[in-house]
Every structure is written in C-alpha cells, then in structure tokens.
Image: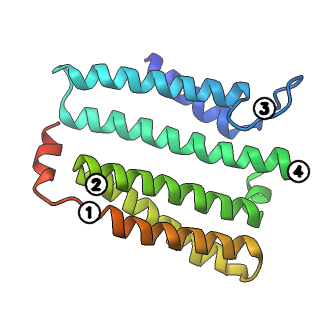
Amino acid sequence: MCALFAAGWLLRVNISTPHRPAPLPYLPLLNPLELASVGLLWLGWRGFEQIAASDGWSGTAKRQYAALLNGLAFIVLSAGVMRLWHFFDGIRWRLDYLLASFGLQASLSVVWAVTAIVLMVGGNRSGRRRRWLTGATLMAVVVVKLFLVELGNSGGIARIVSFIAVGLLLLLVGWFAPVPPKENILEETKK
C-alpha cells in the first residue's frame, strides 16, 4: 500500500508543476524534487530485490512490479528533461508549450535513445532477451517520434542533431550489442 502511495506521489509531483526549489537555484539532478524522486525509485528497487529473492510472489507479479518501477523511472527521467527546459529556456509548464519546443523534443529523443541503448547493451551483456527487446521497442518509439515530430517541421539544428545522435547510437548498438539468443527466454520466464 505504501509503495502505491509513493508511486502516485512520484507521478503527481513530477507531472503537475515544475516545483521551483526556492530559495535554492535550480540544478538538474541536484534539486530536492529530483533527489527525492531518485531516492524513492531506489527504495522501490531495493524492495524489488527483496521480493525477487522471496518465493511469495509469482513470476508474473514480479515482472509487473518491475514494469511499474521502470515506467515510473522513465516518467521521472522525461519530466526531469522537461523541467530542465522549463527552467533554462523559460518554456511555460504546460504540456502544449513543452511539446512545441523543438529543443525539448530533440533532448527527449536523445535521452530516450540513450536509455534504449543502455537497456539493449545491458540485455546483451546479461543475456536477457526481454530487456534487450524493451530497449529495441523504446528505440523504435524514438525513430517513429523522429519521423512524426522532428520531421513534421523539417529544418533546424535541433532536429539535425537529434537525427545524427540517434543514428549513431543505432549503429553502435547494432554493432556491439546484438539481440541475445532465444533460448534465454525460458530462463527469464522462470525468474
């Protein structure tokens, strides 16, 4: 119950307002909101490690808990990028204004692509196909976003930079972290 309350709080505070850390200056990653968010996510992962070690939860419940934590971490990361653009570029904290910012869109594309690369490389190194496929799915979302959003108003240095960065990341992951073999899926479903 406490975990659900913490998850709801994380969503609300990261999405509702930018939460100016007055009287402190806004520093990315080092402001009270982001430190509290990272702390709660860390506590969630520590709890997950204990749950994963116990036999009281089914494999499906463990995967759902992990998916919830991963989703929350993704939202916190994306909201942190939006907050950065809000405070440093002066974009109003309204979804329509934030989504209209080409710099923010390029930043989200690059951050999401790096997240996908981390998942894909981690999945390759640990032999966890599901993790690799999650990263590949996120990378596909980034590519679709590049074509639909960034190319929607072609031109501009932000779009060019995001396309080049994502393209280079795709090239690197294809070379260094190909998909793990299928036989690892049976082992993953047992965990």
Label 3 sits on residue = 19
> Which quadrant holds residue 21?
top right
Question: Circle 4 — which element?
Answer: loop
Q: Amino acid at mark 1?
A: Val
Q: For marks 1 and 4, give the one nearer the viewer.
A: 1
Check the image and report above or below for 167 versus 19: below
The residue at the point 29 percent across, 19 percent down is: 50
Say which amino acid is labelled 3: His
Amino acid type, residue under disc 4 in the picture: Gly
- Mark positioned earlier in the residue sequence (3 or 1): 3
Looking at the image, which residue is at 16% across and 60% down? 181
- Location of residue 14 with respect to 137 vertically, above or below: above
Q: Earlier in the sequence, mark 1 or mark 4?
A: 4
Mark 4 and mark 3 in contact? Answer it, CB < 8 Å. no
Q: Secondary structure at mark 1?
A: loop
Marks 1 and 2: in contact by CB < 8 Å? yes
Q: Which mark is residue 179?
A: 1
Q: CA distance from mark 3 to mark 2?
A: 38 Å
Label 1 neighbour load within 10 Å: few <14, some 14-19, many 20+? many
In the rendered view of the protein, which quadrant contains the N terminus?
Answer: top left
Q: Which residue is mark 2?
A: 124
In the picture of the structure, the residue carrying the numbered disc 4 is 90
- First in sequence, mark 2 or 4: give its number: 4
Q: Residues within 10 Å of mark 4 (few under 14, many from 20)?
A: few
Q: Earlier in the sequence, mark 4 or mark 3?
A: 3
Q: Which image quarter holds the C terminus? A: top left
